[in-house]
Image: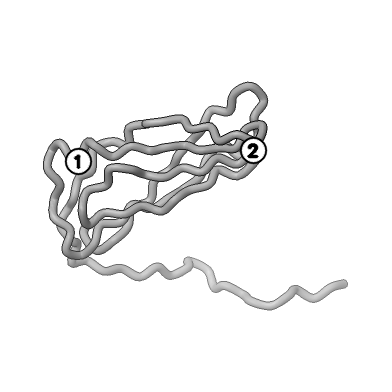
Amino acid sequence: MTGIGHKFVVTINREDGFDGPVSIHATGLPAGFSATQLVVEAGHLRAWGTLFAASDAEAPSEEDACAVKLVAVAQIDGRESRKWPFDFGKLVLKPTSKLRGRLEPSQPIQTGRAACR
């Protein structure tokens, strides 16, 4: 949707005992689109990011919609190692929703500390 972000998850396969952090960024984003740079932290297998479409973004062409790739970068034994490109998938721009919502907890939320016995 335009003017809003959409969450995505990246899951990595760790190889050869490597357990360090892995940075992941998107390349080939069409005009009007941006994405957060991710870091899969040491010892973890996934990270969540957000893909944004500006409020004035136009639907990308078929070629541009399929051109987005993810690049993974890590430092292994003091050297930079890149794994790429990984297909992000096809970008689809949906119209902005006119519906607005509000979330309310089903039970009251208490703040402060519980008393110690």
Q: Position of residue 35 (x, y in %)?
A: 36, 52
Lower position in the chain sequence, tag 2 or tag 1: 2
Q: CA distance from mark 2 to mark 1?
A: 32 Å
Indicate the amino acid at tag 2.
Gly
Q: Position of residue 86 (x, y in %)?
A: 37, 31
Q: Is residue 33 left or right of residue 114?
A: left
**In the picture, residue 53 is in which quadrant?**
bottom left
Q: Position of residue 114 (x, y in %)?
A: 75, 73
* Towards the viewer: 107 or 52: 52
Which residue is denoted by mark 1 in the rendering?
65
Q: Can you say whether 94 is above or below 69 in the image?
A: below
Q: How is the image coloured?
A: one colour
**SS assignment at label 1:** helix
Q: State the residue lying farthest toward the right.
A: 117
* Towards the viewer: 100 or 65: 65
Which residue is drawn at the image coordinates 53% and 28% (left, top)?
Answer: 13
Which residue is drawn at the image coordinates 43% and 43% (left, top)?
Answer: 9
**In the picture, residue 111 is in which quadrant?**
bottom right
* Towards the viewer: 76 or 63: 76
Image quarter of the N terminus = bottom left
Which residue is denoted by mark 2 in the rendering?
20
Q: Can you say whether 51 is above or below 3 in the image?
A: above
